[in-house]
Image (cartoon, grey):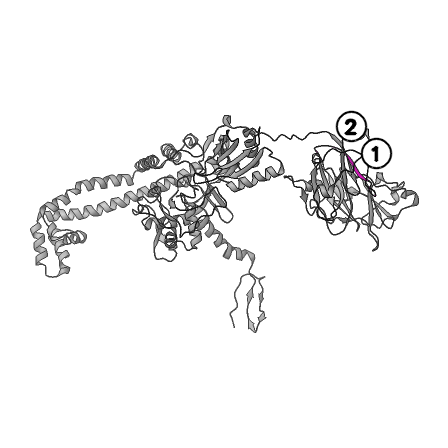
Amino acid sequence: MPRKKKTDDKNAKVVNPNVMGLRAEVLEQPITETLEINYMPYAMSVIVSRAIPEIDGFKPSHRKLLYTMYQMGLLKGGRTKSANIVGQTMKLNPHGDQAIYDTMVRLSRGYGALLHPFVDSKGNFGKVYSRDMAWAASRYTEAKLDAICGELFRDIEQDTVDFVDNYDGKVKEPTLLPTTFPNVLVSANKGIAVGMASDLCGFNLGEVCDTTIAYLKDPNCDLMATLKAPDLPTGGELLYDEAALRTIYDTGRGSFKVRAKWRYNKAEHLIEIFEIPYSTTSEAVMDKVAELVKAGKVKEIADMRDETDLNGLKLTIDLKRGTDPDKVMAKLFKYTPLLDSQSCNFNILIAGMPRVMGVRQILEEWTAWRMDSVRRRAFFNMNKKKEKLHLLKGLQRILLDIDKAIRIIRETEADSEVVPNLMIGFGIDQTQAEYVADIRLRNINKEYILKRTQEVDALEAEIADLEDIVGSPKRIQKIIVSELQRVKKEYAVPRRTEIVYDHQITEVLEEVDETPDYPVHLFFSQEGYLKKITPQSLRMASEQKYKEGDGPFLYWEATNKDELLIFTDKQQCYKTRLCDFEDSKASVLGDYLPTKLEMEPEEKPLWACIPGDYSGNLLFFFDNGKVARVELSAYQTQTRRKKLTSAYSDKAPLVTAMLLREEQEVALISTENRCVVFHTASLNPKTTRTTQGVNVMTLKPKYRVEKALPLDKTSITKPARYRARALPVAGALLKEEDRGEEQLSLL
């Protein structure tokens, strides 16, 4: 019998199902315990060991890949197959080969996601500005470390950083890379963890070096004086907003705007876009422009194509004759990702804890960490030189009597006694004696020993200098400054992202709606024909023509710019503008809406309204006696959608609808000739279009609701007889004097 599991939860239950003759015990675990034991370790692992970069600017996957390439000798040697690098990296990174190769692609020069790529690539590595351009498999591409990686691994063997065991404990790997410049601010980095994320934009290397030097000299310096703005790998134009950038510099959060670079080819009357924002892709831009052209929002474009080649990105837009290219680009900047916002979230791991920091705080943490690395390097070199000095001082003792040393060695019978006898004969320690004993016979001469011992004075001076460095933060800062100056001189490149200041920004013009606006009269027939007639035409002939068997249904006075909502028997709502209809005359039938709006086969319009500013409510009357009140704003869309599905409930057939601008009384009449008068205030509005509504009128099985009319549109003379005190009610039979000759009202 299996042992029962213990639990501290008094409410936990143990279930012993008998499945296939085997008894098993299932323990119900509290959700809080599950989160603590299972979810929290996973979340912390993702945050600390995967998604968030550290102060050297790298995530663990980046660091493991680059260190593996360094160990393979790819900093100075030739390129090797990417598959070889991926395989070697798996000794440190226990993930699949595809994940490792994807990491290499992002760091490569060919992909172009970094201002200063760390991988010198050969072959097809895709492009950061393309969504669909796939990179070649690792067996086809080659790679090595770029020259700037020398600054990542400089003096890594001199105890500048800590090393830990890899996942199986067989090799060592660095916890951080001893970067000689603030790579965390230079290399763009993005990661999504559990409950948090990180989004670091890149800055120009030269500006970062200058800013770090200025910070070391004065921690309260104005960062914006040297760190002008972010610099993105894909270039573009950064719209300078000092307040937004200062917020990012101070808090580590915020956003700034970047737009594409373009030029106008006057000879061929076309626009060429050759740099786009870092946050988008060429395919996304093409798709959005095509959508705008199809919707008629940008009518000046004749054609657009992607002419990207080995020379780089190029999107070409052919313009129609007489088109102003500046106005076209102003529209595209407003409606497409050609002008986009780049968000910032400077979330970095500091001593294993995620922290969102501004630029000054990042520089503070980086300089403190780098000063410790330089101090450790100086201390390591100092100890090495002290060891060498110690050996040379032992060699100096031998200089006093070389013959004695030879005699001691020659006269000693046992090999194990040579070192002790030298220690006794010259008063030196074991380390020095072993060093002397290991000198080759040909080097036991006065000249050799004198040359070696002459280094003593120089070593003592170097050791004193290193001791001063270890104990002097000012000297360490000077070393860091000199390294930053050297890095800037060797690797800095001009800015890729141009800064556009306020006075240079072309205002994005508001789209001018060229639709003429004038009053019109609308006539909607029972069969679904719509006529739009101007007042002048209506005065000339007011008698409307209808198809045989058809007649008037709805009528409005509107303007040419108004929208029209048409509800059909298939729970769909079609949205159209009155300007899309040609002006008509009373003597014609008008536009047949199922054909004009491309409705589905056998779909018929039931009701329509002009929404105006989308304030108010819609009342839907169903034949089962229910009434749904839906806010009109539920049908408002940001884009010009032509059709909304699930426009109302499909649980019962729709009898009619009503546009409700203000509360009023409504009469509901059934096929049994019963009537209920109720106030619309008794119905609560819903934001869900498919709400079934509330039951207002109870019906016998063979009857249904036939009509719904505003009370003032009916012939009821004594409405008190039909008013409902509470809903639902069966209603009262209509008296003869209240029936009248009911006409279809214009709702």
Secondary structure under badge 1? loop
Q: Quadrant of the C terminus?
A: top right
Above or below 216: residue 110: below
Above or below 504: residue 547: below
Magenta highlight range: 548-562
Q: Earlier in the sequence, mark 1 or mark 2?
A: 2
Residue type of the residue flagged with mark 1: Glu
> Residue farthest to the front?
267
List the residue tagged with mark 2. 536
Q: Which mark is residue 543?
A: 1
Q: Which mark is residue 352?
A: none
| Residue 148 visible (yes or no) | yes
Between 59 and 446, which is closer to the camera in this rendering?
Answer: 59
Does residue 561 belong to the magenta stretch?
yes
Between 26 and 541, which is closer to the camera in this rendering?
Answer: 541
Within 10 angstroms of label 1, few (less than 14), some, or many (20 or more) residues? Answer: few
Cα separation between marks 1 and 2: 14 Å
Residue 720 shown left or right of residue 179 in the figure:
right
Q: Position of residue 98 (x, y in %)?
A: 44, 53
> Residue farthest to the bottom?
21
| Residue 59 visible (yes or no) | no
The quadrant in which residue 640 appears is top right
Does residue 344 belong to the magenta stretch?
no
